[in-house]
Image (cartoon, grey):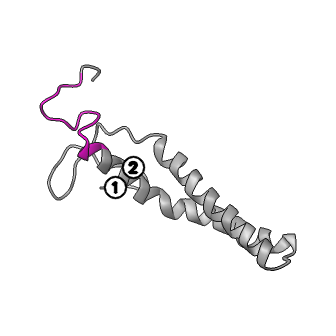
Amino acid sequence: MFRAYLKVADACSKCAENLSHHRADDAPPYIIILLVGHILVGLMLHLEMAWRIPPMVYIYSLVPLAVILPLLLLPPVKGAIVGLQWANKMHGFDPDKVDEFL
């Protein structure tokens, strides 16, 4: 589905479905911010309630997680958004409806 890290290919390599008209621009980063924020804040609260941890431990452990987790989660979430648009026949994926804005 991807030709680069986050660049969606113009067509599917298996079925030749046209993917060039997807609109998954801002949704994946917002979803990733929501997911990673909840994971990190929950982990931080759990660690703080279970043990008394110095602040530098958070910097050394949670800051790398705050960088690595979004980089790992962005491609699958963007693929899921494009797949959701395809499944719901949104943004030009419906062959019966011609998009008048193109």
Res 37 visible: yes
Residue 2 on the magenta span? no
Which residue type carries mark 2?
Lys
Mark 2 burial class by Cα count in 10 Å: few <14, some 14-19, many 20+: few
**Relative image position of residue 38 (x, y in whole percent):** 62, 59
Q: Which residue is at a point 37% across and 37% down the rendered structure image? A: 23
Q: What stretch is highlighted in magenta?
A: 85-99
Residue 5 in sight: no
The total of numbered circles placed on residues is: 2
Q: Position of residue 99 (x, y in %)?
A: 23, 25
Residue 57 appears left or right of 80 = right
Q: Is the magenta stretch mostly helix, strand or loop?
A: loop
| Cα–Cα span, label 1 and label 2 | 6 Å
Labelled disc at residue 47 = none
Q: Where is residue 44 in the image (x, y as percent from the top left)?
A: 73, 68
Instruction: Kindly state the secondary structure of the residue where label 2 is placed.
Output: loop
Residue situated furthest bottom in the rendering: 51
In front: 17, or 41? 41
| Residue type highlighted by circle 1 | Phe
According to the picture, the residue beneath numbered tag 2 turns out to be 7
Report the residue that reaches farthest toward the front. 49
Q: Earlier in the sequence, mark 1 or mark 2?
A: 1
User: Which element type, helix, strand or loop, lies under badge 1?
Assistant: loop
85 vs 59, left or right, is left
Q: Name the residue under label 1.
A: 2
x 43%, y 52%: residue: 6
Where the C terminus falls, by quadrant?
A: top left
The residue drawn where x is 22% and y is 48% is: 11
Q: Position of residue 77 (x, y in %)?
A: 43, 55
Q: Would you place residue 86 above or below residue 40 in this image?
A: above
Quadrant in the picture for the N terminus: bottom left
| Dot 1 and dot 2 residues touching (CB under 8 Å) | yes
